[in-house]
C-alpha cells in the first residue's frame, strides 16, 4: 500500500464511527428483503460509467458505480458503499487487471475499513467491452433466485462464453494483452491501410484483413466455431472463429472508420443481434492504439444464462458459508478444497485465518 492509500486509511479510522453495515436484513441464504417484502437484487458494480451497457429489458437493474479516487474522496466512497450494502445486502464488483492501481487500492481500502465480508471484488481478465458485457449478464442474473455467492462465482463461468476482440489499425503494442504478434505483423502495422482482426478471448487470434475492399475483406464461410490451431492461425483475410451458440454482438468505434464488424464479422458469426455502444475510455490503452473498433459477443437470453448457471453443482464455502459454483468463493476467495497446511491466505481478501 502506497503513502496515499495509507493516509486515506488513517483519516478514515480517525473519523467518527459509522452505523454498522451489518444491520441490513440479510437472511441465512444471503438475500436482502425490502420493507414491502420483495427481494432486493445483489448490486453489480463497475468503476466507470462507460462500462454500463443498456439494459436488454425493463427487468434488468442498472449497475452501481464505484467512483475512482480522482472523482470521490474516501469519505464519499465509504458512504456510497455503505448505502449500497444497506439496500442490496451484497455487492459484486468487477476488478479487471487493467484498472489503474489507485482505483484497485481504493476498492480494497473501502472493504477493509467497512470490515464486511459482503463485498466481492472479482478479478476478471477481459478487455473493457467484454467486461461491460459480463457486468450486464450479472445484472440480468441478479433478479433471479440465485444467492449472492452464486452470482459472484458465476462471473468466472460466464466469462468463458464471451468472445472479445477488436479490429485494429496497428498491432505494434498488442503483445502486452497476451495476443502474440509476429515480426511480419509488426512490420505491416506501419502501412497506413493495414487492418487486423484480433480475438483476445477466449482463444488468442490475429490475422491481417485483405485491403481490396477497404478493410472489409475476409472469408464469410466456416468462421463460426472454426479452430485455427494457434494465436496467429489463418491466412490474411480469415475471420476469427466465432461462438458455436447463439449470441448478440456489441461493438464500439474508436478512431478507425470501418464497418467490418457489423458488415462482415456479425453475419459470419450468425449473431442474433448487433448493438453499437460508445467506446470505453480504457479501450485504446488496452488494445495499444486508438485506431480500433472493439467488439464482444455473449449470450443475451436470460433463460439460457440461468440454465447455464443452475446446471453447475452448488457447494458451500467452508470459510464464509456462502453458496458457490466452481472451485473458489467470489466473496472471500477461499478455494473449495482445503489448502495444504503450509498455504497462506489468498492475497487481497481482507480476512485473516485463525
Image (cartoon, helix red, strand yellow):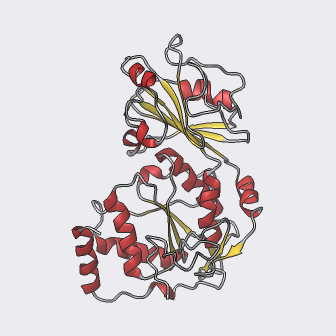
x and y percentages locating residue 79 in the rendered image: 37, 76
Q: Tell me if residue 71 comes above or below residue 86 in the rendering.
A: above
Identified at 56% across, 18% down, the residue is: 236
Does residue 60 appear in the picture of this structure?
no
Does residue 271 appear in the picture of this structure?
yes
**298 or 303, nearer to the observer:** 298
Left or right relative to 14: residue 311? right
x and y percentages locating residue 242 in the rendered image: 66, 35
**168 or 86, nearer to the observer:** 168
x and y percentages locating residue 150 in the rendered image: 65, 69
Quadrant (top left, top right, bottom left, bottom right) of the N terminus: bottom left
Residue 38 sits in quarter: bottom right
x and y percentages locating residue 105 in the rendered image: 35, 66
Left or right relative to 309: residue 240? left
Q: Tell me if residue 169 comes above or below residue 251 in the rendering.
A: above
Left or right relative to 331: residue 184? left
Amino acid at each position: 500500500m502506497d503513502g496515499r492509500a495509507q493516509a486515506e486509511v488513517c483519516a478514515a479510522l480517525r473519523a467518527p464511527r459509522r452505523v454498522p453495515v451489518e444491520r441490513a436484513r440479510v437472511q441465512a441464504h444471503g438475500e436482502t428483503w425490502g420493507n414491502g417484502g420483495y427481494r432486493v437484487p445483489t448490486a453489480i458494480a463497475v468503476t466507470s460509467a462507460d462500462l454500463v451497457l443498456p439494459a436488454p429489458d425493463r427487468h434488468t437493474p442498472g449497475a452501481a458505480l464505484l467512483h475512482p479516487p480522482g472523482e470521490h474522496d474516501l469519505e464519499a466512497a465509504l458512504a456510497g458503499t455503505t448505502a449500497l450494502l444497506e439496500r442490496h445486502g451484497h455487492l459484486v464488483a468487477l476488478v479487471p487487471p487493467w484498472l489503474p492501481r489507485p482505483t484497485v487500492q481504493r476498492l480494497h481500502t473501502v472493504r477493509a475499513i467497512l470490515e464486511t465480508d459482503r463485498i466481492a471484488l472479482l478479478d476478471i481478465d477481459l478487455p473493457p467491452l467484454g467486461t461491460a458485457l459480463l457486468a450486464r449478464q450479472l445484472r440480468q442474473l441478479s433478479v433471479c433466485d440465485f444467492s449472492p455467492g452464486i452470482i459472484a462465482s458465476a462471473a468466472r463461468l460466464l466469462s468463458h462464453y464471451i468472445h472479445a476482440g477488436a479490429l485494429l489499425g496497428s498491432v505494434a503494442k498488442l503483445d502486452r494483452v497476451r495476443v502474440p504478434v509476429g515480426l511480419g505483423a509488426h512490420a505491416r502495422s506501419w502501412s497506413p491501410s493495414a487492418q487486423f482482426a484480433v480475438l483476445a478471448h477466449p482463444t488468442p487470434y490475429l490475422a491481417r484483413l485483405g485491403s481490396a475492399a477497404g478493410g472489409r475483406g475476409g472469408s464469410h464461410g466456416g468462421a463460426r466455431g472454426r479452430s485455427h490451431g494457434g494465436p496467429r492461425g489463418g491466412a490474411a483475410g480469415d475471420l476469427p472463429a466465432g461462438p458455436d451458440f447463439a449470441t448478440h454482438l456489441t461493438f464500439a468505434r474508436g478512431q478507425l472508420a470501418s464497418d467490418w464488424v457489423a458488415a462482415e464479422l456479425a453475419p459470419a458469426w450468425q449473431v442474433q443481434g448487433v448493438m453499437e455502444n460508445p467506446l470505453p475510455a480504457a479501450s485504446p490503452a488496452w488494445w495499444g492504439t486508438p485506431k480500433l473498433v472493439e467488439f464482444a459477443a455473449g449470450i443475451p437470453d436470460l433463460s439460457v444464462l440461468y440454465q447455464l448457471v443452475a446446471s453447475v453443482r452448488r457447494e458451500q464455502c467452508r470459510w464464509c458459508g456462502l453458496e458457490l459454483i466452481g472451485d473458489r468463493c467470489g466473496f472471500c476467495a477461499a478455494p473449495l478444497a482445503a489448502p495444504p497446511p503450509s498455504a497462506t491466505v489468498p492475497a487481497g481478501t481482507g480476512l485473516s485465518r485463525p
